[in-house]
Amino acid sequence: MVNIGQHNQLEVVEQLKNSFLLAGGRYGDIALVKQEAPQGTRVGQILTAFVFIDQDGYLVATTHQPLAQVGQVAWLKVIDVTPQGAYLDWGLGEEDALFLPRQEQQNPVELNRYCLVYLCFNEQKGIYATTYLNDFLQDNASEFKQGDKVSILVANQTELGFKVIVNHRYWGLLYANEVFQPLHKGQTLTAYVKKLRDDQRLDISLQPLGFAKVEGITGDILEKLKQQRGYLALSDKSSPDAIYAAFGVSKKVFKQAIGTLFKQHKISIEADGIRLLSK
């Protein structure tokens, strides 16, 4: 089965002068221009290709990587605005820009600005974008558990922190007092499920939870000590900003990590820093 607007595993069924034909099931053969095919491509081979509808209305395949695919949320640039809608750069060139219909714009978009959209497909409209994210994203995220690693996209800043989109499917919240780095709308990051609340909504953390978080940073501290000839001017008395700038973790996690290393007799803790102990 071919999924339009997504990556597919497709069999090469015929080689023409300028293209390969890929088996498209009920959609028929799908053309892939020869210069995009991997060197040595042959009939019978399975290729990974992105299938979309080009400017002429034909179903085609490409090995280029779009910025997003159907079923995902993306932060895309507006490259043209018409009375019917806007066109967005999704990485496949201006001629095959992604259409954002006027009726799918919660607020009118502006030329050369970015907008947050969800990519859709149906047989009548083809592939298109919408800014009505709530029609596609869910609050109930009961499939997750504490500590799960996820991908997030920053949506909006609120009084509590940052509203984020988790794995392109769910809303989550990143609390402001737990963020130690600049964030901007449209930014994508790796994050972790801090808590699945009683209402099945997600609280998100930018750092691993519990022992995994501490265990992960201990190796970084040791490596940094080796790079700095065995001494690092950071301690449990250093500022949270200085600690985050060096290791990207909170002061609490840093203190737990150097405490672990101290107990393992790998470092000594001095007044203004930590020192690597020789074996």
Image: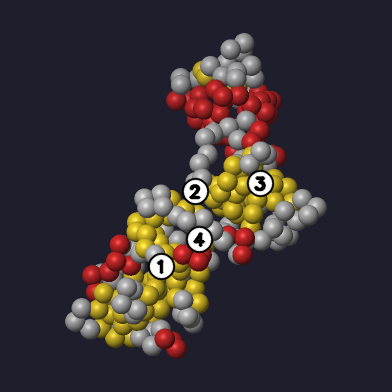
Percent x, y for residue 145?
Answer: 72, 54
* Disc number lying in front (1 or 2): 1
For marks 2 and 3, give the CA distance: 15 Å
- Determine whether label 2 and label 3 are within 8 Å by CB: no
Question: Who comes first in sequence, dot 4 or dot 1?
Answer: 1
- Kind of residue at disc 1: Gln
**Residue at mark 4:** 105
Q: Secondary structure at mark 4?
A: loop
- Kind of residue at disc 4: Gln
- Label drawn at residue 173: 3
Residue for point 34% across, 74% down: 54
Question: Who comes first in sequence, dot 2 or dot 3?
Answer: 3
Q: Is residue 260 left or right of residue 31?
A: right
Question: Who comes first in sequence, dot 1 or dot 2?
Answer: 1
Q: Quadrant of the C terminus?
A: top right
Residue for point 51% across, 55% down: 107
Pick out the residue farthest to the top. Answer: 271
**Residue at mark 1:** 84
- Kind of residue at disc 3: Leu
For marks 4 and 1, give the CA distance: 11 Å
- Label drawn at residue 186: 2
* Disc number lying in front (4 or 2): 4
For marks 4 and 2, give the CA distance: 17 Å
For marks 3 and 4, give the CA distance: 24 Å
